[in-house]
Image (cartoon, rainbow, N blue to C red):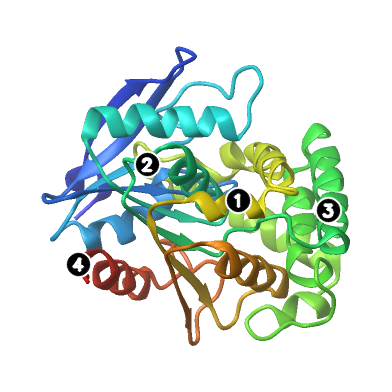
Amino acid sequence: MSNKQKYTTDSVISKDGTIIGYRQMGTGPGIILVHGGAKASQTLMKLGTTLSDEFTIYIPDRRGRGLSGPFGDDYGLQREVEDMDAIIKKTGAHYVFGTATGAIIALQSALYLPIIRKVVLFEPPFYVNETEMNNFNDIGKRYDQYVAQGNFSMAMVTSSEIATKVSGDELEPPYQWVKYIPNIILRLIFIIVMELDARRVKEGDLTLKDLVPTFHNDVVLVNETKGTIEDFKDVSADVLLLNGSKTFLFLKHSIDALNDVLPHVEHIEVPGIDHAAAEDATGKPEIIAQEIKRFLNDNT
């Protein structure tokens, strides 16, 4: 069954007048699924489908993508929280899941929107280590330079350095191979990946080429979290922190920092999965869905 047959679409108007569109499926209590950087709602369709037997699923295209309007002026976490607020007011959803920078948005929303009762965060990249974030931002600057030149394949090569150069030489499979492949080969791989993606893209979805430039704005969000960890001691929602055993060290540092400060928190490290686990193409969303269902259905 195609994605087109599995969902309907709707939209809300955010505080600044921007249209925020979302995909909807399923029945039951509402949960909003928030995608990460250089992604869109299409990325979380398998996760949404797996959850839709018990929940009504809302998967927004975040600003600058697909069903939604442009990033607009003064883009940052405040705009993303305003977008979340608009979706919650229309749908009545009380639960939120976020992956990567989507998890930053989910937790920031829980801080300012107490109507959110439960939040599941998968590997949010909060700014907790200056050395690691300096490395991250260096990668982001070079990424932006390639995008400005229209060299999207080299931008993707550069983004792969997040696996090897943010925290240093601490990789486990499946990322070790990145260290040993020359950039010229990686670039050819990504050229082929983008060409195949453009041929196979489904109606309603965006291509990788559409999504590559949006990563800049997710770097903005990560940097906006600098010095904010202590703020989250005021989150009233119950929080499930999830990470995979195979993820990057800097993301584990982020998880540890949040686990220390959140007042109503459960932390689970899931064996054998990595940072892409929630996503359709290369992840294991059924494992993430199992943890979400257990957490949301726990009334203790």
**Residue 224 image point, x, y percent:** 71, 41
Query: What residue is at 60 percent from the left and 57 percent from the top?
Result: 193
Q: Is disc 4 placed on a helix, strand or loop?
A: helix
Q: Which residue is tagged 2?
A: 114
Q: Is disc 2 placed on a helix, strand or loop?
A: loop
Residue type (three-letter) at the residue carrying disc 2: Pro
Query: What residue is at 28 percent from the left and 28 percent from the top?
Result: 89
Q: Compute the Cα span from label 2 to label 3.
A: 35 Å
Q: Which residue is tagged 3?
A: 139
Q: Compute the Cα span from label 1 to label 2.
A: 41 Å
* Of the image marks 2 and 3, the number of the one nearer the N terminus: 2
Q: Is residue 109 left or right of residue 24?
A: right
Comparing labels 4 and 3, the label whose residue is closer to the camera: 4
The quadrant of the image that shows the N terminus is: bottom left
Comparing labels 2 and 3, the label whose residue is closer to the camera: 2
Query: What residue is at 84 percent from the left and 75 percent from the top?
Result: 168
Q: Is residue 254 above or below residue 272?
A: above
Q: Which residue is tagged 1?
A: 194
Q: Is residue 81 above or below residue 190?
A: above
Q: Is residue 44 above or below residue 114?
A: below
**Residue 181 image point, x, y percent:** 81, 75
